[in-house]
Image (cartoon, grey):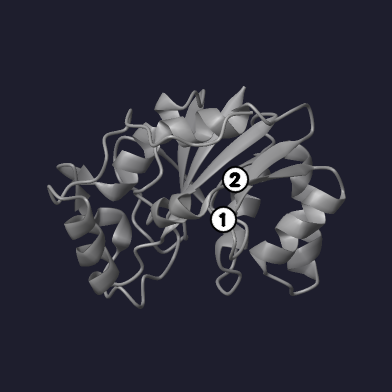
Amino acid sequence: MMLGAVLAGGASRRFGSDKADLAVDGQPLWRRQAAVLSAAGADRVVLIRRSDQPAPAGIECWRDGPAGGGPLRGLQAALAPAAAPWVAVLAVDMPGIDAAWFRWLRGFCAPGVGAMARHPEACEPLAAIYPAEALAAVENRIAGGDFSLQALARQLASAGRMRLISVAGEETARLQSLNTPARFTAWRVQQGTGAAPSVQSSVPIPTP
């Protein structure tokens, strides 16, 4: 079993409005991302939001912890209930990710072990599959005041809890976060039609 979690608890300060509500493919971005996770095989999909953010109709909404922890707080909220052996996490502002991405990552998972892409610049922790056992490391980092997702990825990999899978340079374009209006506009132009790839679309990626 796999839980799907759309992380949509950011303040969107650089964007100027709630990115979760951006219209892509004729639907709000949070719904598009939830559909990606469902199509990827998630048995249950939830939306992670801050306590002061609205909970949209049509999806189960979980709340993350106190402000100041960034996406690590959202990851903690997704893992804490121990709802499934694996949790597929997808940031709400990454529309370049499709269902095939997570089906590819699942091929590298094993009991107690998740999978995450690694490209030339860094790891990609916000479009990854975490094992339930990652919760302890997440909570320890929060308790220590270290909210770096890159450091978490390295820690999990060293502990044998995460497989880091290298992807080619051309794949990094689909991993971009659309965290400013300019980046969102540029991304739509790159798509040609001004729309995001469909949930079932697939860009060739490495196979296990």
- Image point (81%, 61%), residue name: 140
Judging by the rendered image, the residue that carries numbered circle 2 is: 78
Point out the residue furthest to the front here: 169
Q: Mark 1 to mark 2: distance in Å?
A: 6 Å
Name above or below for residue 116 compared with residue 16.
above
Query: Is residue 46 toward the left or the right of residue 142 in the image?
Result: left
Secondary structure beneath disc 2? helix
Q: Position of residue 5 (x, y in %)?
A: 51, 42
Q: Residues within 10 Å of mark 2 (few under 14, many from 20)?
A: many
Q: Nearer the viewer, residue 19 or 194?
A: 194
Q: Position of residue 196 (x, y in %)?
A: 24, 45
Q: Amino acid at mark 2?
A: Ala
Secondary structure beneath disc 1? helix
Q: Position of residue 152 (x, y in %)?
A: 73, 60
Q: Residues within 10 Å of mark 1 (few under 14, many from 20)?
A: many
Judging by the rendered image, the residue that carries numbered circle 1 is: 74
Query: Is residue 69 toward the left or the right of residue 8 in the image?
Result: right
Query: Are the residues tagged 1 and 2 within 8 Å (C-beta)?
Result: yes
- Image point (40%, 70%), residue name: 11
- Image point (50%, 55%), residue name: 169
- Image point (64%, 28%), residue name: 208
Q: Amino acid at mark 1?
A: Gly
